[in-house]
């Protein structure tokens, strides 16, 4: 399994993304920057993967800013 990037603030690797309606989808960010759904059967279609939100703290931003 590929390694996951971590939050620069709290050091966990669990994030979520939102869509226009405010629905959330749990995601991981792989070391190559790819945003993948935590549950493979869930689609990220319609979700904004350019901004991710940390589940452990208040950090949010571009997946490229992760460690």
Image (cartoon, rainbow, N blue to C red):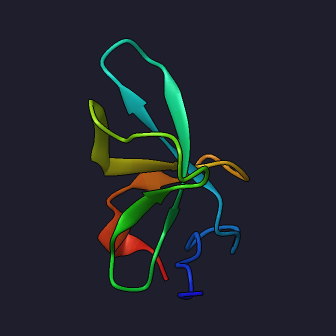
55 vs 13: above or below: above
20 vs 28: above or below: above
Q: What's the residue at 62%, 68% (across, down)?
A: 9
41 vs 23: above or below: below
Q: Quadrant of the N terminus?
A: bottom right
Number of callouts in the render? 0
- Percent across and percent down for residue 37 are 50, 52
20 vs 30: above or below: above
Q: Where on the picture, by quarter, is residue 31?
A: bottom left
- Percent across and percent down for residue 6 are 58, 75
Q: What's the residue at 70%, 69% (across, down)?
A: 12
Looking at the image, which is closer to me, 43 or 66? 43
Q: What's the residue at 44%, 17% (across, down)?
A: 22
Residue that extends furthest to the top in the rendered view of this protein: 21
- Percent across and percent down for residue 34 are 34, 70
Looking at the image, which is closer to me, 67 or 23? 23
């Amino acid at each position: 399994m590929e390694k996951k990037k971590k939050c620069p603030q709290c050091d966990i690797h669990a994030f979520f993304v939102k869509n226009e309606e405010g629905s959330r989808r749990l995601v991981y960010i792989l070391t190559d920057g790819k945003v993948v759904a935590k549950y493979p059967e869930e689609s990220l279609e319609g979700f904004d993967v350019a901004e991710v939100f940390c589940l452990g703290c208040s950090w949010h931003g571009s997946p490229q800013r992760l460690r």
